[in-house]
Image: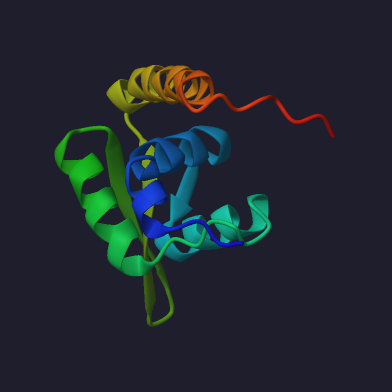
Amino acid sequence: MIYSSELIKGTLKTIVLKLLEDNNRMYGYEITQKVKELTFDKIQITEGALYPTLHVLEEDGLVTTELEYNGKRVRKYYTLSPEGKSKTKEKVSELADFMNTMKFLLDIKTQSA
């Protein structure tokens, strides 16, 4: 089952920030592939969703960018700024609390593996 873009939309900034925290620096396509890999294809981020999110994070001062030239190819790498590092912890904590609240609200029992 692939999760709907509606569910992903509210968590995309947090996902990107956490990936950058864990991987130091990444480029856009690399982010989409890492999310697919880590979620066993349940979350598939489109470029149309990812790049506007990256631009907002950059405008908000949470990520910095660096262009890297490899022959004719140019890659734009994203890295957390110092503010982005502290914001990541806040966003992850907020999302974890939200998920616990949703479990309670929807009366979802924890599933054991």
- Residue 88 found in image quarter: top left
Residue 50 at what x, y percent from top left?
Answer: 34, 58
Query: Up-down: is 85 above or below 64?
Result: above
Closer-to-camera residue (95/101): 101
Residue 57 at what x, y percent from top left?
Answer: 24, 41
Closer-to-camera residue (59/113): 113
Query: Up-down: is 108 above or below 6?
Result: above
Measuring 68% from the left and 57% from the top, which residue is drawn there? 40
Can you name the residue that lies furthest to the bottom here?
72
Please identify the quadrant where the N terminus is shown.
bottom right
Residue 32 at what x, y percent from top left?
Answer: 49, 60
Closer-to-camera residue (41/61): 41
**Is residue 104 rendered to the left or right of residue 108?**
left
Please identify the quadrant where the C terminus is shown.
top right
Color encoding of the figure: rainbow
Can you name the residue that lies furthest to the left here?
59
- Residue 62 found in image quarter: top left
Measuring 35% from the left and 67% from the top, which residue is drawn there? 47
Measuring 51% from the left and 18% from the top, which residue is drawn there? 104
Query: Up-down: is 66 above or below 81?
Result: below
Measuring 38% from the left and 58% from the top, which residue is drawn there? 5
Can you name the residue that lies furthest to the right here?
113
Closer-to-camera residue (86/73): 86
Q: How many marks?
A: 0
